[in-house]
Amino acid sequence: MKLHTICVLSVVLVAGCNEVEERLAWSPDGARAVLRVDDRLYFMDTNGNLSAVVASNVTGAAWQPDSRGLVLTRSLTVSKWEDAAKLLPPAEVDACQTLATSFLALGIEGLEQFELKRDELASPALMYLFDTQSNALHEALQKSKDPGKIESDLSNLRTTQVAEVSIVSLDGKQLRVIERTLTGLSQARPSPTVPAVAFVRGDVLTVAPLDGSTNRVAATERSMGVYDWTPDGKALVYAVRQSDKDASSFQFADINRHLVIDTNGVVAGEMQPLTVNALTFAPRVRCLPDGRVLFAGVPLHLPGPVTGAGSAQFYVIDPALGTNAVPVALPAAAGTLPQDLAAFAPSPDGRQIAIVESGSDVVAVLDVATGALEVVSPKRGWKSKVLPAWRGTNELYFSALSASSTNRPELFRWRKGSAPQAISTNWPAAVVSSLLAKPEK
């Protein structure tokens, strides 16, 4: 993006997203869950009792394996350069100052041709100028046709976001920062067996030790969708985009298994290609307890007709088979699965898969062995925002309407053989309203 384009833009804050996200997660011991509502984090017990807000500025939360703490991703709003310089790594502080110096050297006319390599540096660079070199900035802007307007537009961009991955213990110990950066951070997930955490930094799937040291391993720089740890906690399974130029109707992705932990700690180990996948939705790659890798895709036979894609299906592949590994389609009756299989959650024992669609509020559970599909919550006309979360192997929590005639979403608990039970009837409206997206008129 050209810097002059940024100069005439106002800050746009994206408040709330209607895609299905992992907003609810049960601790491994099943004692409590965390629920993220916008950027606020709550605890919930097994009876649905909700705590007061326990953390803010949160964009994601995952339990540590011992259920004694959380790995958080947060977005910290900063409006003063002094504060930004304390939070950011030295390399990013230097990059912002270098960009600011270029701004002054080029002047407003030179900015017309100035190309930013990292858009996220623009706001903190302007913050640096306003806070430390305001006179020089004011003088540089006098050559523009409307210096007052340009200066006002730039001033509106003086707030920036610093992304953070951190560890917080439930025993009240001080928060421990793993990563801070101007680049977006997401999907922080601890290894189930090793003191290490993986997270996505921009498009880079990164692994870091939990002790706060600076050692980092980039598993891939082209990650897409949702990744997972293997059960032994030493490798990652993930999807990698094959090309940025795929046709709009299809994406092609490689699914890989990558060793990132050995006896020496975090390492860039062997990468094992598993399969190539075609899909029309964001990929989600999950590892089952037996080590097989679960993913969804669209069967595509080439050469074939322009509309040659079949219905979306679930597949598993066994990395233990090495080069002989082939994806095996899970059984499912024709026409029962939605075409959008981006949002699903396998049960901890790998025997069931909970499914929602980003475009509807239907919740269903697929039996992995038989292909039987049970709709546990029918279509009510709204849109899901919360990925269903399992507590144990046979207890599922999901958001839905209790009836088509109501406008109040609820969180439900479902056990096989029983009707879903709403457990959020005493929650504030501001909390339950975040569970579903109301259809647009």
Image (cartoon, helix red, strand yellow):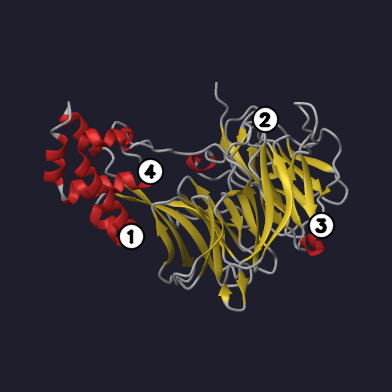
| Mark nearer the N terminus (2 vs 4) | 4
**Between marks 1 and 4 in the image, the one whose residue lies nearer the viewer:** 4
- The answer to whether the residue labelled 3 contacts the one labelled 1, judged by CB atoms less than 8 Å apart, is no
| Mark nearer the N terminus (4 vs 3) | 4
**Between marks 1 and 2 in the image, the one whose residue lies nearer the viewer:** 1
Percent of width and height locating residue 383 = 61, 34
> Could you tell me which residue is drawn at 65 percent across and 28 percent down?
381
Residue at the disc numbered 4: 119
| Mark nearer the N terminus (1 vs 4) | 1
**Between marks 3 and 2 in the image, the one whose residue lies nearer the viewer:** 3
**Cα–Cα gap, marks 3 and 2:** 41 Å
Percent of width and height locating residue 218 = 54, 61
Percent of width and height locating residue 438 = 56, 30
Q: Which mark is residue 87?
A: 1
Q: Secondary structure at mark 3?
A: loop
Judged left or right of residue 233, residue 156 is left
**Between marks 2 and 4 in the image, the one whose residue lies nearer the viewer:** 4
- The answer to whether the residue labelled 1 contacts the one labelled 4, judged by CB atoms less than 8 Å apart, is no
The disc labelled 2 sits on which kind of residue?
A: Arg
**Cα–Cα gap, marks 4 and 3:** 41 Å
In the displayed structure, 332 sits above or below 176; it is above
Percent of width and height locating residue 162 = 37, 53
Residue at the disc numbered 2: 380
Residue at the disc numbered 3: 325
**Cα–Cα gap, marks 1 and 2:** 45 Å
